[in-house]
Image (spheres, rainbow, N blue to C red):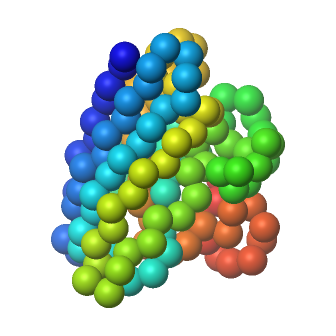
Amino acid sequence: MVKAVAVLGGSEGVKGTVYFTQEGDGPTTVTGSLSGLKPGLHGFHVHALGDTTNGCMSTGPHFNPAGHEHGAPEDEIRHAGDLGNVTAGDDGTVNFTIIDSKIPLSGSNSIIGRAVVVHADPDDLGKGTSSAPGP
């Protein structure tokens, strides 16, 4: 089993911890707890670079080793780092579990060392329905 953790801290008091686990070549399980968010949907992605020195601006685009279009987690064709939205409750917190087969923790397409980003706005899931964070 391979495990990883990302500790998030951002502007306006957003913080949290995201855990990743993967058994062999199976899917990766992502569990997280975040607080300090505005209530509602927030795009949740793995970005290409682990550089957070300038916030989201320095993390590069969504992790996309196959060169696919932006999409939803359930889409066959999507960026590997497109993990959809998480929903913060009225208290600004969210606990979530995501199981995904496109974000391995080992091998040439590993997400280890990349940034985990929770966006202020919802992700349009590649449908072009909002000004949400895209590629």
Q: In the orientation shown, which residue stands out farthest toward the left?
A: 13
Give coordinates of residue 80: x percent, y percent.
Answer: 63, 38
- 84 displayed left or right of 34: right
Q: Quadrant of residue 96?
A: bottom left
Q: How many marks?
A: 0
Residue at image position (22%, 61%) is: 15
User: Residue shown at 75%/77% (left/top)?
Assistant: 129
Residue 36 can be seen in this image: yes
> What's the residue at 58%, 58% (across, down)?
84
- The answer to whether 74 appears left or right of 104 in the picture is right
Quadrant assignment, res 50: top left
The residue positioned 79% from the left and 42% from the top of the image is 76
Residue farthest toward the bottom in the current orientation of the protein: 90
Q: Nearer the viewer, residue 50 or 26?
A: 26
Instruction: Name which quarter of the figure residue 134 lies in.
Output: bottom right
- Give the position of the N terminus as an image quadrant: top left
In this orientation, does residue 11 appear? no
* 23, above or below 97, in the image: above
Q: Is residue 114 left or right of residue 76?
A: left
- The answer to whether residue 36 is above or below residue 15 is below
Left or right: 36 in relation to 54? left
> Toward the viewer: 85 or 10?
85
Relative to 102, residue 74 above or below: below
With respect to residue 96, does 30 lie above or below?
above
Q: Position of residue 133 (x, y in %)?
A: 59, 64
Location of residue 34 in the rendering, given as x and y in whole percent from the top left corner: 28, 62
Q: Position of residue 109 (x, y in %)?
A: 57, 21
